[in-house]
Amino acid sequence: MAVPSVSTEPAAAAAPGGTVPAQSRVPGDAPGTPELSELFGALGALEPAAPAGAAGAARCPDVRARITELRLSAFAGHRRAAIPLGPVTVLAGPSGAGKTTALMAYEALARLAAGVPLSEAFPDPPACVPQRARPDAGGRRGFRIGCTADGAEGPVRLDVAVQAEPVLRIAGERLTAGGVVLLETALRDPSRRAVQAAWHTAGSAPVTRAPLPDDRLGTALLPLRVAGKTDGQRQVLAAAEQMVVALRSVFPCDPHPASMRTPVPAGSGRLLPGCDNLADVLWRTRAECARRHALLVEALRAGCAGPVTDLVAEPLADGTVRALLDRGDGLRTELARLGDGELRYLALALVLLTGPGVLAVDTPGEVPDALCSLTVLADGLDRGLDPAQRRALLWLAARMGERGHIRWLGAVSDGSWATGVRGVTVVHLDRDGTS
């Protein structure tokens, strides 16, 4: 599981920023599913208007901060793994190939970028250490992870070395852009709970040195420590902001059908990672955005058995809310009657068609939405879904990924059904690291 392979159809060179370009084949709608054509035609209504200008003018570059590569240099069972991330990425491989640990590493980096301490980002640090890692003379063992964020500042790399034993702490961190080391930290004195940091200044002194806490990500602390008086300092701040913004907006999603079948208390209307409060969220979104709700209903026609004319939520006398499918002939079906695959499909489609304002996710409120993208982490993406549901959900993810505001990283056991879909990157992980 050291070096993943990436399926491309046809083979193509890697795109800037470490992503793999979308495959060239455009899939057609499956026979007997006209709802897909209606859905993707309706999605065009959400596309921003093309900018005025001469025909054939170049498209504006994408300046949204986004993660384009995840690096697991030495993490759990991974060695020297560099996983390219596109708008929609599917990690495929057998059980034990490291799909879940890759998602866990991504989520941990996101939490560190949000400012949480190491102990919260890695609740079980020894499990992250490669099994064959030998302790040094001081009994220390650890792991190394990193990522690349692309955006207005170009590719920015972050690499972090974490000491897991005997004490959890950051042993080293490096932030680089354009071949320049913008931030570098190192654990100089193991007896102190601090690392020595040096960041790029390009002023009268080439770098500024100061201690930083050893239990926090230094990149996330830079806006509090760098004055921004020189060009070098402004470069450091811009690169750090791009990395933090790209990492912060992450929504790990694993719908639990059993919890979605019963009425739920009315609450905030923000969807939880397990989608337990689906009915409460539908009660809110149906009233707030009729256009996106209509798109969700179109998606359900492709993924649910029987006719679907609407998806409604209604309050009950005991203060709870329940959701029902409207069949169009006066008959309404409670979610309790739906299969696990239908419920998971419904929840994942809702996630794709909403956004940070509806999902329970930490977002950088000080950054305009046009510069942010939300990443959904979906372990067991294909769990319980039939082929038609998988196909419809993947195409919906690819279509929404084209708009740039949402990115998708899912894990499946068999990625053959996702290979060749336009806008989808399939990364194959093997237990022994071969492809």
Image: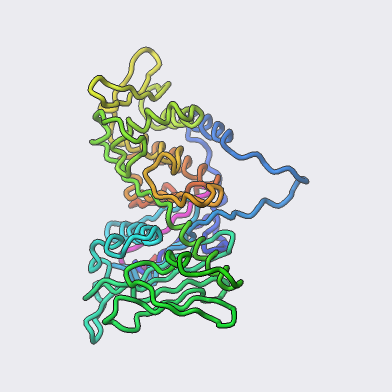
Tell me the residue at 47%/54% (across/down): 425
Image color mode: rainbow
Q: Is residue 359 left or right of 133 when viewed as pictured?
A: right
Work out whether residue 217 or residue 51 is closer to the camera in this orientation and state it: 217
Left or right of residue 153, residue 360 in this image? left
Residue 348, quarter of the rendered image: top left
Which residue is rendered at x = 37% and y = 20% of the image?
326
Q: Residue at x 41, y 39 (%)?
A: 358
Residue 117, picture quadrant: bottom left
Depicted 276 relative to depicted 103: above or below: above
| Helix, strand or loop for the magenta stretch, by majority | loop
Point out residue 435 in the picture as x, y percentages from the top left corner. Answer: 40, 65
Decide which of 13, 183 is in the foreground and name it: 183
Horizontal side, residue 268 vs residue 365: left or right: left
Q: Residue at x 48, y 64 (%)?
A: 223
Question: Residue 413, position in %: x, y?
Answer: 33, 52
Give residue 420's position: percent from left, percent from top.
50, 50
Q: Quadrant of the N terminus?
A: bottom left
Where residue 126 appears, x then y in whole percent?
23, 69
Residue 7 seen in the figure: no
* Front in this rendered view, residue 304 or 256: 256
In reply to whether residue 431 is colored magenta, the answer given is yes
Is 365 drawn above or below residue 153 in the view shown?
A: above
Q: Residue 313 lies in magenta, yes or no?
A: no
Q: Which residues are magenta?
A: 422-434
Q: Viewer-proximal residue, 192 or 153?
A: 192
Q: Is residue 79 visible?
A: yes
